[in-house]
Amino acid sequence: MSDYKELLEVLLTGDGEKLETLVKEALENGVAANEILNQGLIASMDVVGARMESGEMFIPEVLMSAQAMGGAVEILKPLLSEEDSAVAGKVVLGTVKGDLHDIGKNLVAMMLESAGFEVIEMGVDVTPEKFVEAIKDNDADILALSALLTTTMPMMAQTVKTIEESGIRDTVKILVGGAPVNQTFADEIGADGYAPDAGSASKLAKTLLKKSAYGSIQTN
Amino acid sequence: MLNRLQSLDRARTERLHSACMEVLNKTGILFNEPEAVEIFKANGFRVDGNKVYFEEEQVMNALKTAPSEFTIRARNPEKSVRIGGDHFVLSPGWGAPFIVDAAGDSRAATMADADNLCKLVQTSPHLDMIASAMVPPKDLNAKTAMAELLAACFTLTDMPLTTNPCSRENAIETIEMASIVWGSREAATASPVSIVSVNPTSPLTYSPEAAGGLIELARGGQALLISSMVMAGLSGPITLAGTAVLEMAESLAGIVLAQLVNPGVPCVCGGTSCSADLRFCSASIGSPELVKLMAISTQMSRFYGLPCRYGGGLTDAHFPDMQAGMESTLNIALSLVSGAHYMHQACGILGSYTEMSFEKFVLDEEIGGMVKRAISPVEISDETLALDAIDRVGCGGSFLMEPMTAKRCRSEFFMPKVSMRETYEKWNSNGRADVTKAAEKHVQDRLAAYVKPDMDPGIEKDLKAYIVAKANA
């Protein structure tokens, strides 16, 4: 067991170079890669997530931390067993058809990846059919839909409907988000969850998968 | 004259201009609409794929045909408005999908809300224009939604129209429906009967919908409001100078296209750019940064000889509270003071454009009325200098008994409809009701007092038939 206080401090400042040095040092000192990943990096990134949610950290600072984390994970990857590198879940993510906005969506992708999810990034202006295809091809656990325009919100409903019609609705959890979207709207269109920001999106993704795995509600 | 608000001298103005020209010339603008690219090509612009590059001379030549002021005709000719020069207009809030009621509860907007907002505009003492889709109702068929909202504007009000099409098809609808109202396409397109908002997607991109709508409406002779909402730190550089340049470049690129399609078609430049709150990555439309960007934009618009859009009853608050009042007043007042000519979103907006409040609608309207009154010039004449009265009353008297005071007591000062000016005791005995309560009652009074303006029943029938045909198409 190592002390990850310094690693946390460095991750919080977003200094990628220094973080990589620390990770390499820990490896040289014989600490297992999976321990550095889980108890060091992912645990520290949880602190970043909490500070983002509380407003202590600004999002550009969070992104610097996430980027630094990505660099450090690359060092660990070859040293992780298949089991250790298993992802928390697979998420197909995109902005619905007719909508070209992607800043919020990209942020969600970054937070999901930092939380250990594999993100299949579909980009913007994505048709319902393309989402269905991506869920099938990747055997995804979660579909995360984004819309910024009030005029494209109905396309979220259409996307959910198309997924129902294609017979794969019960294989995937659907998350929705974007400035005009709210919980009521999510309930109305039959989504499984709504997240108001990127930090809660990754938390919600984890909660939803726990729920489905154990068949009962677990709260954080 | 002392002006503390981001006053640009010649050197700073020219620096911003040349930066804007560098963006247009070096980075270019992406037009994801083949027809737009063809128009630029045919006019000798450098094009690479969908990217268009502009020479300074090409931009300045195109701007020569854009008028510095123009008129938008209203169904009631007395309500026609002039935009540009010394003339400015207030147009209501637009595009909020949710209604926040007087208790602070939020719900999806309905067609009944959209109609009621039209009625508030028609009875407004301070608004100059009606806007379609002030709230996009959830209960409409997507195929006919825009047409139904336009029909509500045309039938429930007789005011000049602001509209904001989401596609080329919506743009065509605007012109076709205006043609019904005005009797023929010629009558509706001879000079503008509407101003249409076209929004580039920052940074530096025109979607097929925006560019397609722009081309269609320029052809149809309607006034174009081509303005961006760049969010500094997100869709623009975090530094305001860079964001101001981006906004201008995007706006000018669209105006050049409009002038190539129809030289002389009226265009308004500007924006509603703001800072992002980088704790949440959301737009902060109540921020002082919006005011700084506004001050630059109004001055640069004058440099280009174009009318400018900026400001509004803008706030990030979710209730018509003190924060909403602070931010909205800051925006409305300073934009009008700085010379903005067209104020989209002048009233009703909450929650960074996501919510509409009827109560805030009439409160913002009152802010607009107060600012209009504050900036209207004080009349200086023999009568208003009142030297006779001053001499008659002399030292230590009162002017309350002067005949002029009785004659002018209802007209000389701005008379608020919602704000209270009574004593503490009166307020206390009224249950300490805040201004939102008064606004709630005022909304009800206004809706009760609404009278539908006259319209030829044949026109109304044709508008209905147009919507039915759309539904069946």
Image (tube, rainbow, N blue to C red):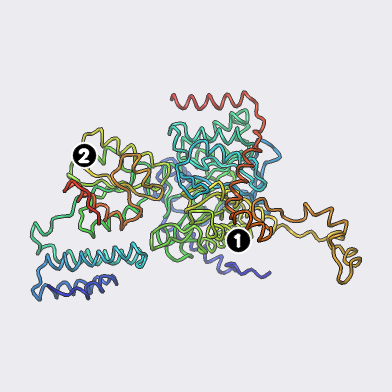
Pick the quarter of the image with the N terminus of chain B: bottom right
Task: Give coordinates of residue B131: x percent, y percent.
Answer: 56, 42
The Cα–Cα distance between marks 1 and 2, rounded to whole angstroms, is: 54 Å
Give the residue drawn at x 32%, y 48%.
A194
- In which quadrant of the rendered view does residue A125 lie? top left
Give the residue drawn at x 30%, y 48%.
A123
Pick the quarter of the image with the C terminus of chain B: top left
Marking on residue B334: 1
Task: Give coordinates of residue B173: x percent, y percent.
Answer: 51, 33
Residue with the most extreme front position: B429
The number of numbered badges drawn on the structure is: 2
Question: Compared with residue A157, is residue A219 higher up or lower down, i.e. above or below?
Answer: below
SS assignment at label 2: helix
Task: Give coordinates of residue B82: x percent, y percent.
Answer: 66, 46
Disc 2 marks which amino acid?
A: Asp
Chain of residue at mark 1: B
Relative to A123, B316 lies left or right: right
Task: Give coordinates of residue B328: x percent, y percent.
Answer: 56, 57
- In which quadrant of the rendered view does residue A9 lie? bottom left
Question: Compared with residue B472, is residue A51 higher up or lower down, i.e. above or below?
Answer: below
> Label 2 belongs to which residue?
A170
Disc 1 marks which amino acid?
A: Leu
Chain of residue at mark 2: A
